[in-house]
Amino acid sequence: MPDLAATPEPEPRTYPADEPGVIDLGSRHFLLPTDGAWLWWHDCPAVAHPAWGWFGQRSDGRASGHVITATEPMTVQGSLVCLECGDHGFIREGRWERA
Ligand SMILES: [Zn+2]
């Protein structure tokens, strides 16, 4: 079942590709470590900026239902879906895999 903790909050409108710790998942999908959780970005055809969501557990105690089963390379249990364009997939072994 698709699952994404996508919440509109302040975010940069550029790709985080050059920031420390960013993971390039391929296919214009990126992960950026933020506040104890991970921001997930992708090149969204439905909006004029990268769409994003997050997973993990943040410092304020909020958490998504995703389980990070490995970090080297990143593997996440539970799919992610973009609420803007419907792009749906998994993060497995550091790569984006379309569902
Ligand atoms: Zn999208």
Image (tube, rainbow, N blue to C red):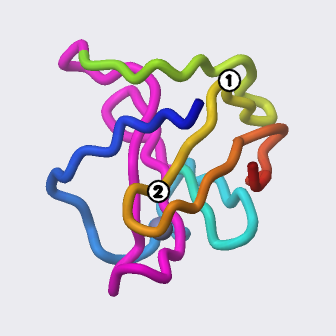
* Residue denoted by label 1: 77
Q: Residue at x 27, y 68 (%)?
A: 12
Q: What span is in magenta?
A: 32-61
Of the pair 5 and 20, the residue shown nearer to us = 5
SS assignment at label 2: loop
* Residue denoted by label 2: 82
SS assignment at label 1: strand
* Residue 28 against residue 40 in the figure, above or below: below
Of the pair 44 and 1, the residue shown nearer to us = 1
Q: Residue at x 58, y 61 (%)?
A: 87
* For residue 8, side relative to residue 4 (left or right): left
Asked which quadrant contains residue 22, the reply is bottom right
Image coords of residue 2 (percent x, y): 55, 37
Q: Are dots 2 and 1 in contact, CB under 8 Å?
A: no
Tell me which amino acid carries mark 1.
Gln
Question: Is ligand 1 within 8 Å of the beta carbon of the residue shown at mark 2?
Answer: yes
Asked which quadrant contains residue 28, the reply is bottom right
10 Å neighbourhood of mark 1: few (<14), some, or many (≥20)? some
